[in-house]
Image: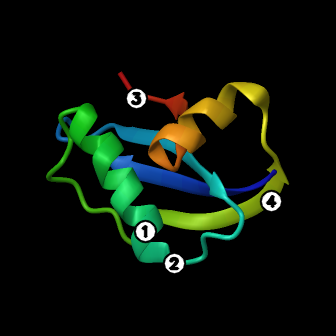
Amino acid sequence: MQAAVWDTYVTKDNGTVMHFDIIVPSEIKDSAVIYRYGKEYLKEKNQEKQALTSNECSFCHIETVLPEWEAAINKKGYFIIEMENCN
């Protein structure tokens, strides 16, 4: 399976910037779907009031799905890779 990687930077309530990637099946091209997944993740992190638009999230590249991503993608439709300031 091929996956699309959406590079995302969101400013948290405290002013720090969260950096995470949203991983989705490559056939999902609707940015509204990607942003919805990102908002679900932000809600889990108690950051649901933060903006998530094309200013914060953009398509980066396509790569092969890693086994540890596949279960989450099959269950939720996406996988998040936490890069910086996600705690």
| Picture coordinates of residue 50, whole percent (x, y) | 22, 54
Q: Is residue 81 left or right of residue 33?
A: right
| Residue 29 in view (yes/no) | yes
What crowding class fits label 1: few (fewer than 14 Cα within 10 Å), some (14-19), or many (20 or more)? few
Query: Pointer 4: residues within 10 angstroms few (<14), some, or many (20+)?
Result: some
Give the residue type that dot 1 points to: Val
Q: CA distance from mark 1 to mark 4?
A: 17 Å
Contact, mark 2 vs mark 1 (Cβ under 8 Å): yes
In the image, residue 53 lies at what x, y percent? Answer: 37, 71
Percent from the top left, x then y, of residue 59? Answer: 64, 67
SS class, disc 3 = loop
The residue pinned by badge 2 equals: 30
Residue in the image at 61% along x and 31% along y? 71
On the picture, is 6 further left or further right than 26?
left
The Cα–Cα distance between marks 1 and 3, rounded to whole angstroms, is 21 Å
| Mark 4 vs mark 3: in front | 4
- The residue that label 3 is drawn on is 86
For the question of whether residue 80 can be seen, the reply is no
**Residue sitting at x 39%, y 64%:** 35
- Foreground label between 3 and 2: 2
- The residues bearing labels 2 and 4 have C-alpha atoms spaced at a distance of 15 Å
Alpha carbon of mark 2 to alpha carbon of mark 1: how far? Answer: 6 Å
Precedes in sequence: disc 2 or disc 4: 2
